Amino acid sequence: MNVLRRVMCSQFANKVTRQCFIPKHRSSLDRQYSNSRLNILGIETSCDDTGCAIINGNGKVLSEVVHSQNLVHLRYGGIIPDIAQDLHRIHIEPTVSKTLDKANLTMEDITAIAVTLKPGLPLSLAVGMKYAKHLGRRYNKPIIPIHHMQAHALVARMHHDISFPFLVLLISGGHCLLAVVQDVDHFQLLGESMDCAPGEVFDKVARRMKLRNVPEFSKLSGGQAVEAAAAKATNPHMFKLPLPLSEYKDCNFSLNGLKTSVLYHLHRKEVEHKIVAHELIPEVNDLCAAMLMATTRHLVHRTRRAMVFCTENNLIPENCKQLVVSGGVACNNYIFSALQMLCNETCYDIYRPYPKLCTDNGVMIAWNGFEKWKKGLDITTDFSTLDIEASSPLGESLIHQVRDAKISTKMMKIKSSI
Ligand code: KG4
Ligand code: ZN
């Protein structure tokens, strides 16, 4: 059995499954939030997935539908905003109708509409916002504006007993950041990506490696394909890749250099093997493993520093240290297992949402709307105040304070067989 595959089969992987699927606090949450007439409709169109879901007053998902554009964009080798918008326009109405039908509800039964307004692709965000406003006006329902990254962070509370405050690592195709979540509406940003996000790197490199030409990878996202290829590696130490930002004592992320190194090795091997057209280099699995390990090392290194900063500044209580990992890349079992090792060492509990709730979906938007509704936050019937924002920082920035603290952290050895 190769080294990376062993990770999936280890005790950690079992623990991951247990932690992910036992809703420990369901009954207390039910009591706390019980409201038989509350139904929140969530709409997500920030990127290439048209998502919709309904959550009732007990915090229970009544229905959910996601229309994914993944296969279309795979053909084009990346998300084309105009095409994403056209597909959202085509699918938004049927997706919302199907969600209502599945829950056996009509718009009359909906209490409020939660919709992603930031950050994201403007053309995509606009479709969700316009449709939410149309529904709001037609059926006289209030709208709850949602920040996409806040929704990714908070959805972990739906199935896990996670109290405020907690540390969150958000890793997706568009973002990479570390933050402390003090409350539903209070986020403290500790570090963010200075160039590209991990999912973006996996997607671009997977395409350049031609992983799509391997039949078993042909329908997977770049990140999924990289994880699957890495699991087949026979020599994950063949390629040496640098640890990004090792000299910078902050919690920011940079993956551009790593991506360039991987592309350099790929090109070198293609020349060496005289690779043509649709062929892949024979070492493709080992190169994927090396990239995955290097990315993981970087994520773990920055997260460790964030944990020290939180302790030194009393941001997270010593008796309740929790790390949430969310966003599409959180589906990656190798990355999650490495973070779990870090958490074992630092006495943190670690959580992630179900895989289908890590990637973009309507449930996380409806859940965020539900949490905001309970606290009376951001609910409006004045739709003229609502607009989309392509980029939007997550809460108050503590990035300078983190940098000024100059915290040295030891490197955790990330083995290919965690
Ligand atoms: O959160 P998400 O659905 O969309 C954004 O907000 O970006 O994340 C999508 C990203 C894609 O780049 C995809 O390649 C990556 O998540 N992803 C993965 C895995 N599953 C999805 N990356 C690594 N390992 C995975 N298993
Ligand atoms: Zn996302």
Image (tube, rainbow, N blue to C red):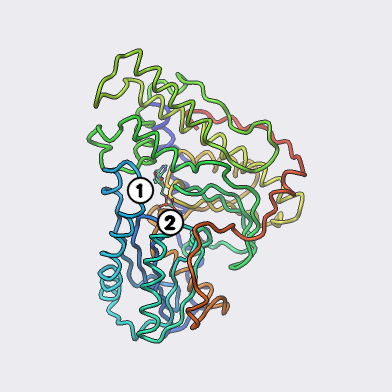
Against 88, is 381 above or below? below
* Rendering coords of residue 146 (x, y %): 49, 67
* Rendering coords of residue 54 (x, y %): 37, 73
The answer to whether residue 272 is left or right of residue 297 is left
Disc number for residue 121: 2
The answer to whether residue 158 is left or right of residue 45 is right
Q: What number of labels is visible? A: 2
Q: Quadrant of residue 85?
A: bottom left
Is residue 1 visible in the rendered image? The answer is no
Residue on which disc 1 sits: 79
* Rendering coords of residue 239 (x, y %): 47, 20
Q: Amino acid at mark 1?
A: Ile
Disc number for residue 44: none
Label 1 environment density (alpha carbons within 10 Å; few <14, some 14–19, many ≥20): some
Q: Amino acid at mark 2?
A: Leu
Whether label 1 touches label 2, CB < 8 Å? yes
Q: Quadrant of residue 126?
A: bottom left
Secondary-structure class at tag 1 = loop
* Residue at horizontal 30 percent and vertical 33 percent from the top: 211
Between residues 345 and 377, which one lies in front from this camera angle?
377
What is the residue that sits farthest to the top in this orientation? 272
Label 1 CB less than 8 angstroms from ligand 1? no
Against 98, is 19 above or below? above
Secondary-structure class at tag 2 = loop
Between residues 353 and 175, which one lies in front from this camera angle?
175
Label 2 environment density (alpha carbons within 10 Å; few <14, some 14–19, many ≥20): many
* Residue at horizontal 69 percent and vertical 49 percent from the top: 399
* Residue at mark 1 to residue at mark 2: CA–CA distance: 10 Å
The answer to whether residue 177 is left or right of residue 305 is left
